[in-house]
Amino acid sequence: MLPSLQIGPLSIPTDAFILLVGLWVGLNVAERRSHRHKVKREVLFNLATITLGTGLVGARFGYVARYHSIFFRNPSDIFSRNLGLMDPNIGIFIGFLSALIYVQQKKLSFLAILDALSPAMSIMAIALGFAHLASGDAYGFPTTLPWGISLWGAIRHPSQIYEIMAASIIFLLTISGKTLISSNCKGSVFFSFLAMTAFARLILDSFRGDSQLLIYGIRSMQVFSWVIFAFSFWVLSKLRVKNVKVL
Amino acid sequence: MISSKYWYLITNGILIVTAIYIWLSRIPDNGKTQVGFSVPQKGFQAPDIKLYNLADELIALSDLRGNVVVLNLWASWCLPCRSEMPALQAIYDEYIQRDVEILAINITNQDNLDNVLAFVKEFNLTFPILLDVDGNASQAYLLNSLPTTFFINKRGFISDIVVGGPISETLLRVQVEKLIQE
């Protein structure tokens, strides 16, 4: 576990650094392979820049809007370097919305873009596992199994390692063109990736020790993953039958 | 390509099996898995520490149960620590009447007591400055980077951690307000 890198007076959160590297590698891989989905490299670059830029600004302004009365006392903190002053959910929403507007304005195929971005997303999923390993987040449930690791006062499932292994397998399947339906259908790569990721998350969350619970001890992330899994199957079913644009 | 009939059969079968898996893998008795461990991680009980302050009084974190605690680890030579001290003092002044306590633990085993005293005087700090002379507190809190700030709720559980700094006054205020209203 290495939560931060201390370089002189600078303290860099290791998890954020790993995610940035993952994003950079992922986008490079996606750009190199974008021609397979008839998407120009510049389009992916522009899309990533717009999504990230608006996502970051949206995350900060979402946070400011939520705690506006506190920000009124120190308005200069709107531009603070503190990453804690962000609302990630609003950021993701704004970033996604901006990407959607960009794709529609440029009259691009949304499904082809999603297919082209799938390798980047699967690399980000691997990076997320490494980020969790570095920070000690997403830790496992206590176990007596011989491969358990000592973390946070107990021998636990190495849930971060499981996460990296599952994401690596999904990455290999994604770049090798293995899809759950014919890979000629636009969207088949992305929705196969989404189905596999949701399935992996559904299974692996049962080994996590930090799960948020719904009722009767049911983990909320498993339920959310199941819904995404079912949605992916539904879209794949439509795609395999009609092979037409659905989004 | 498999026929539509088999496709729907297989996909629905997988969805039913995974739904059953969710039920079978639920946490028994709706239990929280973090209970019973005192470790410096979000969601866990904050490790207890007993340290002397500058007035030579022994202060224990566990004695502050019922208060929101902002636990800040710092050193006088650490530049971000210097930058965030006025914000910590402002929050202390504002919230002291509302059951909020700030504990600033100086990493004395890597600092100099004369410098600590000069630092406290320079910033007019009035909140408790605890001296980690033998490094036990920094070890208990797995200190990796200075400054590090832990936000601890009234029940003694860690609600958030900010590694590095300087932490802004706004972030401190948001975290403290959230914990007061918890």
Image (tube, coloured by chain):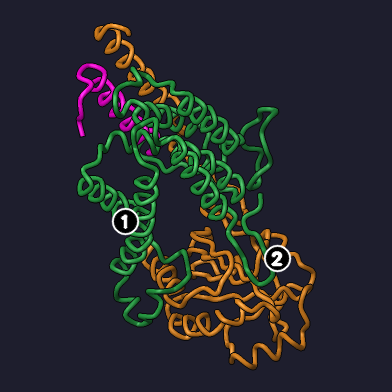
**Image position of B86 with respect to A1: above or below:** below
Q: Which residues are magenta?
A: A219-247
In the rendering, what colour is chain A? green
Kind of residue at disc 2? Ala
Mark 2, secondary structure of its residue: helix
How far across and how far down the image is residue A124, in percent? 48, 42
Residue B148 occupies quadrant:
bottom right
Kind of residue at disc 1? Ile
- Same chain for marks 1 and 2? no
Residue ID for mark 1? A90
Residue ID for mark 2? B137
Q: Please tell me which residue is depicted at 25% across the width and 50% down the height of the picture.
A: A102
How far across and how far down the image is residue B170, in percent? 42, 75
In-front residue for pair A32/B38:
A32
Tag 1–tag 2 contact (CB < 8 Å): no
How far across and how far down the image is residue A214, in percent? 36, 39
Mark 1 vs mark 2, CA separation in Å:
37 Å
**Image position of A17 with respect to B111: above or below:** above
Q: Please tell me which residue is depicted at 37% across the width and 28% down the height of the picture.
A: A189
- Chain letter for orange, please: B
Q: Residues within 10 Å of mark 1 (few under 14, many from 20)?
A: some
In-front residue for pair A26/B161:
A26
Q: Chain of mark 1?
A: A
Q: Chain of mark 2?
A: B
Q: Residues within 10 Å of mark 2 (few under 14, many from 20)?
A: many
Mark 1, secondary structure of its residue: helix
* Total labels drawn: 2
